[in-house]
Amino acid sequence: MSTKMNKLMAAAVAVLGVIGTTPLLAQEAADGGQKEVKFTDVFFHLSAEAIVLWILLIGSVVMISFIIELFIRIRAKALMPPAVVALLQDAMNTYNYQVAFDTCKANQCFLTQCLGPAIKVIGLGKHAVEEALNENFAKYSVQLKSRNNYLSVIGVVAPMIGLTGTVLGMMKAFATLGQSGVANMTGLSSAISEVLIATASGLTVAIPAFIFFYYFKNVATSVFTDAHTQLKTLLRNVPYDQLAGFQVADGEQAAQQ
């Protein structure tokens, strides 16, 4: 029993000693001794750690695509184009609900996707209009916000994947130590370097994913609040009592009307 404990303690001391002497090993590489392990050495080497790095690379590409998409889509000008808002304000203020409905159909954006169905049932009363407005507002806002949730998923999963590479690298490190003992410091230090590369890669993907997740979460809260206020403003002066039974014409019916 004591022999096994002594071996484990010796292994732990050896690993800690290698970690502490990593700069020295890098210096030896510069002097023509041991070669320092680089990211590309692991990345292009067929191993479990390389697979982990490739998965993280794919995750980073997906993350960047989501960030670019969210920058484009979650903006006040994208959700509520000023020109479209001006047209809708003019139509609603002059009680020309057919023009307002046609404007919504001709200019598809978040605002018109919510307002169009509400105008379509305007003859059924205020309750029907608010129900249609709230239903479509929730539907389309959730669709946009769901894209941001993927950033949170990447932020959670990336460190786990990096940790997988860390565990695989430590298994290799102790396997090398068990086979060759402390005499083979080159193989041991190389395995530990792969551990650090996998860990760092996971964090490199996770940190910006979380930063942009919370950024877009705050932006979405502000923008959607403004959009909801704008929708309420457009419908504020609708004389529901005078519009009982009113129906907007859709498609060819609008042209005939």
Image (tube, rainbow, N blue to C red):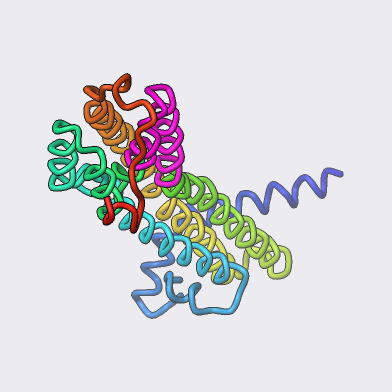
| Vertical arrangement, residue 198 with respect to residue 246, above or below | below
Q: Is residue 133 magenta?
A: yes
Image point 35% across, 32% down: which residue? Answer: 122
Where on the picture, by quarter, is residue 251?
bottom left
Q: Position of residue 63 (x, y in %)?
A: 41, 57
Give the quarter of the figure containing the N terminus. top right
Q: Is residue 124 magenta?
A: yes
Q: How many numbered tags mark residues here?
A: 0
Where on the picture, by quarter, is residue 217?
top left
117 left or right of 6 in image: left
Residue at the right extreme of this rendering: 1
Q: Between 219 and 203, which is closer to the camera in this rendering? A: 219
Q: Which residues are magenta?
A: 115-144
Q: Between 252 and 12, which is closer to the camera in this rendering? A: 252
Where on the picture, by quarter, is residue 39?
bottom left
Image point 49% across, 57% down: which residue? Answer: 196
Q: Position of residue 151 (x, y in %)?
A: 44, 49
Magenta-drawn stretch, dominant element (helix, strand or loop)? helix
4 left or right of 24 in image: right
Q: Between 82 and 104, which is closer to the camera in this rendering? A: 104
Image point 48% across, 73% down: which residue? Answer: 43
Image point 42% across, 55% down: which residue? Answer: 205
256 left or right of 185 in image: left
Q: Position of residue 55 (x, y in %)?
A: 53, 65
| Vertical arrangement, residue 123 with respect to residue 45, above or below | above
Q: Position of residue 108 (x, y in %)?
A: 30, 53
Q: Between 36 and 213, which is closer to the camera in this rendering? A: 213
Residue at the front extreme of this rendering: 256
